[in-house]
Image (tube, grey):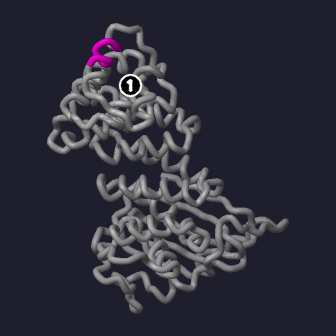
Amino acid sequence: MLWGFSTNGFYHEGFFMRAVAVAQTKDLQTQHLANILWAFGRVCPNIALRQRAMLSLLPSCNQQVQSFKAEELGSAALSLAKTFGGNSADGKLPGVAIEFLAHVVRLAPACVSSFSLQSLINVVNAFAMISMRDEDHIYVAFGQEALQRMQAMSSQELLRTFQAFLAAATRRSNTSAAACSGLMAAGLAWRVDSLKKHEAQCLSRLCCEFFGIEHDQNLSRKELHDYCLCLAASPFLSRGAIENKELPATDWRGRVTYDTLSTLSTQSTDDIESSAEGDQESGRSELEAITHRATCPASVTARMVVKNTFVHIEGLDGDVIAIAALQRSRSVPSLFMQG
């Protein structure tokens, strides 16, 4: 009943209070626990009541955490983050909540391939709201999984995944999440012409917020393409680095130029050519490299081929991000991240 009411957006405080009291007398399984946490997180506006309800169920969650399925871990983690996330900054995240989320940090990376895309996004969004010890394990493992799935994602799925990692990058200043969001921004740049109107509007809002631009009107498709490539060129870019809506025509932050970025191919990742000759990767001297100085403690490398453009993104010597394009490669796309 709690799940049904919440699915339909119905909330009655008296019923919810009584229901959670009765639930504590039942032999609840992991699906029951996850559904109740989700129900309170979705429709209960009374934060104090929601916190009390979740705190009463968390001991059972911690006892049975090894039995939680991937979907249930993602749902429970997001519900807890939405409820207690506001307290995490001052160290007041409840101990039982910390214990459960620590279990998620430990368990989720080992079974990340079993997470649906929505559950993967739920986990990334959850840890974007809270600060947890060793949370980088989540962003590395889930980032690698998301990048492996990126070619098969619809544009809407890629946009939602990008939004989750971008939130983690900006809120938590996490370099692994930043690298993933940069690579996904590059993927969105190739698809920008095929985005639906509401998808383009969402991407426009995300770009404007990231670059500190007044969101008075939606960016054009050409602007979206260019801004996504700028974000991809510098996934560690601090917010507000670009103050005007117009991209600079001269050297940007000393390294990245708008003119060079705009020459990259705009072919969609859904339209791919392959060749029996396989990859024709060249040496670094043959690449038109675009580099930007950034703080990058991890080594990140990614490659993908879109139409006849070979795109190479790499972290070098701990502090350089490079993006390069080569027109001669004609292989089936491959994309990976390491570090």
- Residue 138 is drawn in which quadrant? top left
| Residue 27: in magenta span | no
Closest to the observer, 98 or 72: 72
Q: Residue at 73% of width from left, 67% of height from top?
A: 272
Magenta span main SS = helix
| Residue 22: in magenta span | yes
Look at the image and tell me in which quarter the N terminus lies: top left
- Farthest bottom residue in view: 250
Q: Residue at 41% of width from left, 45% of height from top?
A: 124
Where 154 sits versus 102, above or below? below
Range of magenta residues: 18-23
The percent position of residue 96, horizontal first and vertical second, equals 26, 24
Where 216 sits versus 49, above or below? below
Is residue 12 left or right of 249 when viewed as pictured? Answer: left
Where 184 sits versus 83, above or below? below
Q: Residue at 68% of width from left, 80% of height from top?
A: 327
Q: Amino acid at mark 1?
A: Ile
The residue that mark 1 highlights is 36
Residue 73 visible in the snapshot: yes
